[in-house]
Structures are given as structure tokens and as C-alpha cells.
Image (spheres, rainbow, N blue to C red):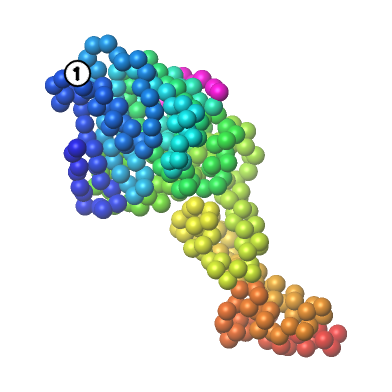
Amino acid sequence: MRQEKHASMNCFVKESWSSVSERDVGAYDTWIDKLKAAQGSDWCPGRRPSGPFRAALRHKVIGELNVIESRCDPCSGFRSKDHAGQHEEPSVILLSYLEGGEHIEFGGQRFTLSAGDTFVWDSSQATRFEVYEPLHKVALAMPTRLLSHDVVSTLRSVSRKFDVSSGSRFLLNNLIRGVADRDFDDADIEADTILDAVNTFVLGAARVEGRPDKSLRQQQQREIIRYIEQHLTDPALSVGQIAEVHRISKRYLHWLFREESMTVNEFIILRRLQSCREELINPEVAHLHVSQIAYAWGFANQSHFSKRYRAQFGESPTETRNKAIRV
């Protein structure tokens, strides 16, 4: 195995192999073993091709992402229900086709894929494939847990072969090819940056196939806001926690709200203050101390709460309560 280390610890070439270096008939078996190892999933080869078998594989690692550029002569294989049911970490592979073609049976459907196509495969279902002419493709493989909930949900309801008319599909295709490029080997980049782009492009491509004609950013904003509203009483609610739960980076989360009048953190504080004010003027909870109300809505520091409250409403929490009592 050849491993090429580069300046960035986030990106390195783990494997670079070609059948040209094989001097015996073991090229086919070697290619299968190396492809399985790079993909991180098991499958069975079909009928052994007759004659010499030409293949090549280049495996690059970026964080938890695996970029696999492969070439091979016609061959076939399958992944059974038993394979899919094995206790391995669920994964998703985005495929970009550069040359040649193959047939794939997935989810009860048959797809013919050739140069320019983009396909999304995942480890949850049985699969069959047949390379019908010498193939050159790039795969971007990742654990399913790294994708946003929206993307995972979307993949259950749309065609895995993306519409060629989608601009987002075009961008996704170029992203997959770009990260496989040798010029990208020295890139100092975080996997989260690539994942943010994948999440955006997959959802954008899916909109062409019947998702509501709404801004992707607005859809994601609404999901984030709904989550915040449901967890205002959780003292652990924060930008970091929200990003982790929704499988996006903090930078992408801030980008979603870049055109709003307040940041995500400011919105959380405002909604908590408003909720506290509603309870301070509610006679049914007049028996609760101001500090109890503040703590219940995520404010662990009473002094911090009082300063924030006065800045927002122009009076102290106690003054708000006293006015409500007099009324």
C-alpha cells in the first residue's frame, strides 16, 4: 500500500494502485479487495472476467470522508440483503461518472449511468451492478450520520440518479471531481466544509424532482427555529449544540442567518427573555421567585439575566412583576 502524506493533516492519499504493476492474474482479486477496503462495505463479485483485467484505484482521505477514484474493465457484482443487514456503520456514496457506463439495480429500480451522471448510493439496500464498458468514476463516501437530517430524509423520496437539468447536480458533480483531483491533495480543508456543500447541493438537486419550490435556506432556517423554540428551557441549548444536532458546521449555521437582524445566539436569548416576561406577568405563577423563572428558561446566572432583561425591556424583572400585580 502506498500512502502519500501532505502538508495538511486533514487530507492524505491512502492508496494509489494500478493493475499495470500486477505481473500475474491476480489483478481482478486485488482490485476487489482494495475497492471494498476503500468503500468500507462488503459485496460479492459476479462472474470472473475472462482474459486480462485492467483497473486502477486512488483512495484519498479527508477527515471521515473517503474519495475513491476508480477505473475498471467490464465486470459485475452484488450486495445482498444480508450484506445490507450487517452491523456496519450506515454509509452514503456520491458517484460522479467520467467515462464508460454501468447498470445499477437499487431500491427496486434499474438505472443506466454514463459520463456526466451523478448517483447516490447508500448501504441500506441490496444492490446489483454491471459495468458494461470500461468505467472511470469518482466516489465520495461518508458515514450517513454526517449528513443533515433533511438530506437523509430526501434520499428516501427522490430518484438516486439526479436530474441532469439541475444546476445543483452540476455543482455537486464538480465538487466530487474536484476533491479527487491531484491538485486537491495539498488542500488545507476541513471535512465539514465539504459536507456543508454536499448538504446544500443534494437538497438543491432534489428540489428539481418535486420538493416544494421554497428557498433551501428558508427551509433550513425554519427547522432550526422550530428546534430552538422546542428547547428554550434546555440550558445546554447553544450554537454548537444546534449545529451538532442538525449535522452542520457552526459556520454554516451562522451563514443560514446571515441576512437576519440578529444572530442565532441573540435570537435564543431574545426568545428566552420574552418567555420569562410572559411568566412574570402571569398571575398563575406569581408564587415563583424571579430567579426560578429565569433558571427554568435557561439563564443560569441571575445577574446576567437581570442585565439582559433590563437592556431588552427597559425595566428590571421585579418591576415587570410589580406592575402586573398592581394591574
Residue 115 included in the magenta stretch of the image: yes
Residue 22 included in the magenta stretch of the image: no
Q: Which amino acid does label 1 sit on?
A: Val
Please report the bounds of the magenta region as a residue range.
Answer: 108-117
Q: Where 171 sits versus 50, above or below?
A: below
Q: Where 43 sits versus 103, above or below?
A: below
Q: Where 51 sits versus 127, above or below?
A: above
Give the x, y percent position of residue 251.
45, 58
Residue 165 in view of the camera: no
In depth, the one of 262 and 287 nearer the eye is 287
In depth, the one of 149 and 128 nearer the eye is 128
Q: What residue appears at the point 38 percent right and 24 percent down from the top-left corner?
A: 44
- The crowding category of the residue bearing disc 1, from other C-alpha atoms within 10 Å (few below 14, some 14 to 19, many at least 20), is few
Q: Where 223 sits versus 281, above or below?
A: above
Give the x, y percent position of residue 82.
47, 30
Give the residue at mark 1: 25
